[in-house]
Image (cartoon, rainbow, N blue to C red):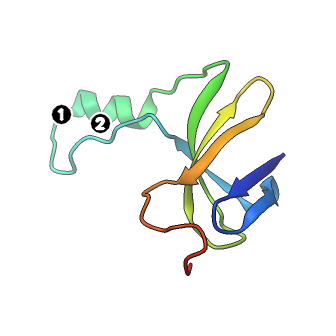
Amino acid sequence: MLITCPYCGPRDVIEFTYQGDGNRERPQPASQNIDAWNAYVYDRLNPAGDHNEIWQHSGGCRSHLRVVRNTVTHEILNTEFAHGARKAGGRP
């Protein structure tokens, strides 16, 4: 599977580390809502089809990427920087 890093270009998946579901929202750090924290830590969906994920280019520029991947075919539909701070062609 090839993932296209916006900075480095197409790279093999072995250069990347899966960081988790890109749709989950973390509770506020000071929140004491145990149900919200339990849902964030333990509840996982297993969708079939297009899915938003966070990956890190750990074997390259170390950027965090937002990747849309089809979980059935493993086709990569879109990649972009997770925080939008770095522009393609900029310094890592």
Q: Is there a contact, CB below 8 Å, between mark 1 and mark 2? A: yes
Is 9 left or right of 36, judged from the image as shown?
Answer: right
Residue type for callout 1: Asn
Q: Residue at x 79, y 58 (%)?
A: 10
In the rendered view, tell whether residue 56 sits above or below residue 19: below
Q: Residue 64: horizontal and vertical position, in percent?
A: 54, 60
Q: Residue 30: horizontal and vertical position, in percent?
A: 15, 50
Q: How many marks?
A: 2
Observer-nearest of 58 and 81: 81
Q: Residue at x 66, y 56 (%)?
A: 17
In the rendered view, tell whether residue 58 sits above or below residue 32: below
Quarter holding the N terminus? top right
> Residue 16 lies in what quarter of the image?
bottom right
Is 60 left or right of 23, judged from the image as shown?
Answer: right
Secondary structure of the residue carrying numbered label 2 = helix
Crowd around label 1: few <14 · some 14–19 · many ≥20 (10 Å): few
Q: Residue at x 23, y 33 (%)?
A: 34
> Residue 49 lies in what quarter of the image?
top right
Is 83 left or right of 17, judged from the image as shown?
Answer: left
Quarter holding the C terminus? bottom right
| Circle on res. 86 | none
Q: Residue 41: horizontal and vertical position, in percent?
A: 41, 37
In the rendered view, tell whether residue 88 sits above or below residue 78: below
Q: Residue at x 67, y 18 (%)?
A: 48
Mark 2, residue position: 37
Quick one: which residue is furthest to the bottom in this view?
A: 91
Q: CA distance from mark 1 to mark 2?
A: 6 Å
Mark 1, residue position: 33
Residue type for callout 2: Trp
Observer-nearest of 37 and 65: 65
In the rendered view, tell whether residue 61 sits above or below residue 75: below
